[in-house]
Amino acid sequence: MVTATEDRVGRGRAARRGWPQRVPAILAGALTALAVLSAVAAVSAAFHHRTQWVRIGVDQLLAPAPANLGYAAFVAVLAAGVAHRKRVAFWLVVGGFSVQLVTDVALLVAHNVFGSIPVERWEIALKPYEPWLTAANAVLTKVVLGVLAASRRYFHARVRRGSAWRALATLVASLLMVSLAGWALVEAFPGSLRDGGDEFSYAAEKVTGGAFVFDITRGGMAPGWVNLVLGLFGAISLFAAMYVLLRSQRAGAALTADDERHIRALLDAAGDRDSLGYFATRRDKTVVFSPTGKAAVTYRVVAGVCLASGDPIGDPEAWPPAIAAWLEQARAYAWTPAVMGAGEEGATAYARAGLRVIELGDEAIIHVRDFQLDGRDMRPVRQAVNRVARAGYTVRIRRHADISA
């Protein structure tokens, strides 16, 4: 078996590239911590009425950190996308910080022009408006945007074509369903909400994590545990949408007729090198050819792993370019490359490309003309044969051409 690993050459190149190439990992860790903070704060706020100064400090100085499970789920999935260097995750982060910077600048301008702003309409009592905090947040946000701009090329992984529209449809449909469910919950447990018409807007607002305020004149609130459940509803919707957007797998693999003809030609020319070569013709696989077309690697994507089987097929001299093309395909979609069942020659070629080799066992080849069941060493095999024969099993061996449709 051959599994992907980072070789010394790769680490040396990474070190020479400097700090920008480490930004995705650092940013993913920061987003994960933010998601945990929001989730813990949401649970705490549901059962205790106490100030949460750590969360509030992060919210005011660094990035939004509401006490909401929906927001926590969104940030957690976004962190996974950033860790896999997804390009769309990069633009989501840049968009969020850009909106934050524009908001900070607008607040500072409004404060300087009008002398004050109606803070009670969009700041809670635990977060009184302070111009210096807004200015500090703007400076830090600008620094973060600069760091992201410097590391932009390291967010190279693509997502499935059409993922954005599928994710949007998933989000809208799921949010509508959970908002209706939340409405029923708030109707049953309205808490201190004054007007019976406020329940739906309140439920929709909490389900979306407070991202949208549908009624700034509404008074009262539902019990803490209801808010927690509404946030959980939103978490499910956002998690589903972000999963659809950021998942690594493409559409189901399938060989085209031209690809299959090309593979069979390569097998006809050099297929006797690998006993597993014939499995490259499976039509649930996808193939990557070398630039010259003299070699190829076939693979399937399973749970984010780009899994090839056996040695590359074709001319061994063209294996390195075929493996390089396959690895580039894996990098483009943030797949983890791996190979199962490579032979010694194939494993050597994969190792030279930077993969790590793990020996699982040896291949056994039986020459049927010379095979005998006689002798003490073959006694366990004879017993197995006799058990199968007594059970009434028979064996027929036919070529594919002799089997009917």
Image (cartoon, helix red, strand yellow):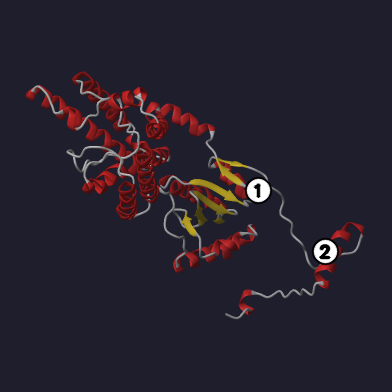
Find residue 384 and name its label.
2
Q: Is residue 311 above or below residue 283?
A: above
Would residue 196 appear left or right of 320 to someone viewing this image? left
Choose mark 1 or mark 2, whichever is in front: 2
Picture quadrant of residue 227: top left
Mark 1, secondary structure of its residue: helix
Judge left or right: residue 171 versus residue 265. Answer: left
* Spatial separation of the CA atoms under disc 1 and disc 2: 31 Å
Which residue occupies the foreground of this view, 247 or 357? Answer: 247
Q: Residue at x 58, y 65 (%)?
A: 268
Q: Measuring 32% from the left and 23% from the top, which residue is drawn there?
A: 57
> What type is the residue that disc 2 sits on?
Ala
Residue at the location (42% across, 47% down)? 333
Residue 251 x %, y %: 42, 58
- Residue 67 falls left or right of residue 288: left
Q: Looking at the image, which residue is at 25% across and 24% down?
A: 137
Label 2, residues with CA under 10 Å away: few <14, some 14-19, many ≥20: few
What is the tally of numbered marks visible in this picture? 2
Label 1 belongs to which residue? 344
**What kind of element bears circle 2?**
helix
Q: Which residue is situated farthest in the bottom direction here?
A: 404
Which of 124/170 is in front? 124
Quadrant of the snapshot with the C terminus: bottom right
Circle 1 crowding by C-alpha within 10 Å: few under 14, some 14–19, many from 20: few
- The amino acid sitting under disc 1 is Glu
The image quadrant of residue 105 is top left
